[in-house]
Image (cartoon, helix red, strand yellow):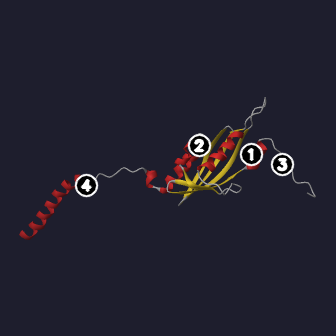
Amino acid sequence: MRTLRRPLLALALLLLALPAALPAQDAPIATDPVAADPIAANKALVRRYLIEILTAGHLDRLEELVGPDFLDSTPGAPQDRRGPDVVRTAQQRAREIFPEIEYQIDDLVAEKDKVAALYTVRATSRGSGSSPGRPIKVTGISLFRIDEGKIRELWTVNDQIEMFVQLGYTLQPPQSGQ
């Protein structure tokens, strides 16, 4: 019986000391689920870019989300310019035609450092004289590359033909012999 008492006594002392040690441990830190998950953080960054910056027109805040080395790799975009001013210039030109532009995010898909955004753009063209502007609604998709919490590269495809049709343009096939 004596040999059994020592291990039981040691176990009892250990169990009694355990609760005293627990409060001395650091309390678990509440973490932001977005900050803890880089994929969720990248999706949140793209959501902010489309809604808080582009839709709200806060082009003065582009530096918060777009890196100084940003490159617009969209076909036809100038490849010799970099940084937030690339976005700012393109958006200012678009707003000359469409004073108010609204992006509605239809889907966001992310993997590693890329986020694909499918969205609907709604805007109304600037009217001229007595004619009111024309509303448009087009679908677009953009692929964002994100590094160190900033958008570094972008590829965009919008339904340009649908936009021009909604603005009243007509498409004609080329004349034979041209």
Q: CA distance from mark 2 to mark 4?
A: 46 Å
Res 2 quadrant in image:
bottom left
Quarter containing the C terminus: bottom right
CA gap, disc 3 and disc 4: 71 Å
- Look at the numbered discs 2 and 4 and tell me whether their residues touch, using CB distance below 8 Å: no
Q: Secondary structure at mark 2?
A: helix
Q: CA distance from mark 4 to mark 1?
A: 61 Å
The quadrant of the picture occupied by the N terminus is bottom left
- Confirm or deny contact between disc 2 and disc 3 (CB under 8 A): no
The reply, left or right, for residue 41 in relation to residue 105 is left
**Closer to viewer: mark 2 or mark 4:** 2
Report how far apart the C-alphas of labels 2 and 1 lie in the structure: 23 Å
Q: Which residue is mark 1?
A: 163
Percent x, y of residue 115? 57, 55
Q: Nearer the viewer, residue 85 or 49?
A: 85
Residue at the image position 67 percent from the left and 50 percent from the top: 140
Label at residue 25: 4
**Tag nearer the camera, 2 or 1:** 2
Reading the chain from its start, which is encountered first: label 2 or label 3? Answer: 2
**Kind of residue at disc 4:** Gln
User: Is the residue 69 above or below the residue 133 in the image?
Assistant: below
In the image, what residue type sits under mark 3?
Leu
* Residue 53 position in % (x across, y down): 57, 43
Give me the disc on residue 171.
Answer: 3
Left or right relative to 162: residue 102: left
Q: Which residue is mark 2?
A: 59
Q: Nearer the viewer, residue 83 or 150?
A: 83
Residue 103 lies in quadrant: top right
Is disc 4 surrounded by few (<14), some (14 to 19) or many (20+) residues within 10 Å? Answer: few
**Most distant residue in the bottom direction:** 3
